[in-house]
Amino acid sequence: MASRFLKLAGWAVTIGAVGAIALAERRHPLRSRKRDVVPRTVRNLAMGATCQAMITISEAPATRAIARRNASRRRGLQHWLGSGVIGKAAAFLAMDYGFYLWHIATHKVPFLWRFHRVHHVDPDMDMSTALRFHFVDMLVSLPWRLVQVRVSGIGPQMLKNWQLFFLLSVLFHHSNTRLPKGWDKALSRIITTPRMHGIHHSRDLSEMDSNWSSGIAVWDHLHGTYRDDVAQEEIVIGVDDPMAERDVAIGPALLAPARSPATRGEG
Ligand SMILES: [Zn+2]
């Protein structure tokens, strides 16, 4: 009964947040759009659906099974630090830090960049960009995801909590939402904000190589990779390689990892 209530609450929060972000994007856009919103959104939703299908048959059952075993065998970081709030918070932070490290790897390891590039090729950035990934990327990232779950020792319920937090975070920070600048700056000390992530989606490599956090922003502050010195009006969203325009469309995007230049900014 309690788990059914939590599930319904999770759906209610997600639907409410998506509606609120969509409204904020319309009323207070952060960047001007370069492309028509409808075809972009349809394309990004379609790519997101293929990713979700892949997650449903691979990552979801595998991570659930490891999380259940973490709880039954009392293993991993969460249990070393006790089963109380401290242990749970540590597991949550470990999952999030794992994503920070993985995100850097997806840019710096040429094989991984071939897949992550498909996400960055989008010439505009809004909430739908959060769903634009190559479905094979879900398999490529799976081994690291399993390591995250195993090392953190996260249990089944905390895993669900973290997944909900992460989903809402990626929808929010990819969104084209202009928050009052003081709010954005204050929030960016704690979580990844649209302005922060806009700098990461710049075609300029010196700007792209910053703001790697996907959930909690503290990792960028701790590692000195946080930037807020670029005005959104000066940013050109996308990737700087000769095949970028071709790979915006869904068909070429799906073939791109097999044929696009592996080196970032090549050309
Ligand atoms: Zn990235």
Image (spheres, rainbow, N blue to C red):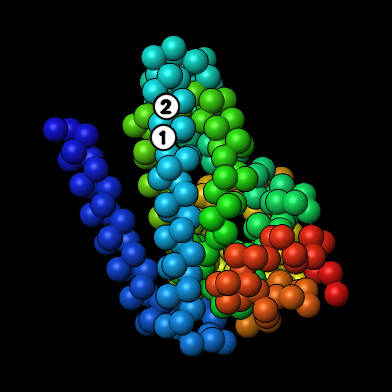
Q: Looking at the picture, does residue 230 appear above or below residue 113?
A: below
Q: Which residue is mark 2?
A: 65
Q: Residues within 10 Å of mark 2 (few under 14, many from 20)?
A: some
Instruction: Please tell me how many numbered marks the rendered image carries.
Output: 2
Q: Residue at x 75, y 64 (%)?
A: 259
Q: Looking at the picture, does residue 6 appear above or below residue 259?
A: above
**Can residue 22 be seen in the rendering of this structure?**
yes
Q: Residue at x 60, y 35 (%)?
A: 143
Q: Which residue is mark 1?
A: 61
Q: CA distance from mark 2 to mark 1?
A: 6 Å
Amino acid found under the numbered disc labelled 2: Ala
Amino acid found under the numbered disc labelled 1: Pro
Q: Position of residue 127 (x, y in %)?
A: 45, 68
Quadrant of res 203: bottom right
Front-most of residues 199 and 221: 199
Front-most of residues 40 and 101: 40
Q: Position of residue 146 (x, y in %)?
A: 55, 32
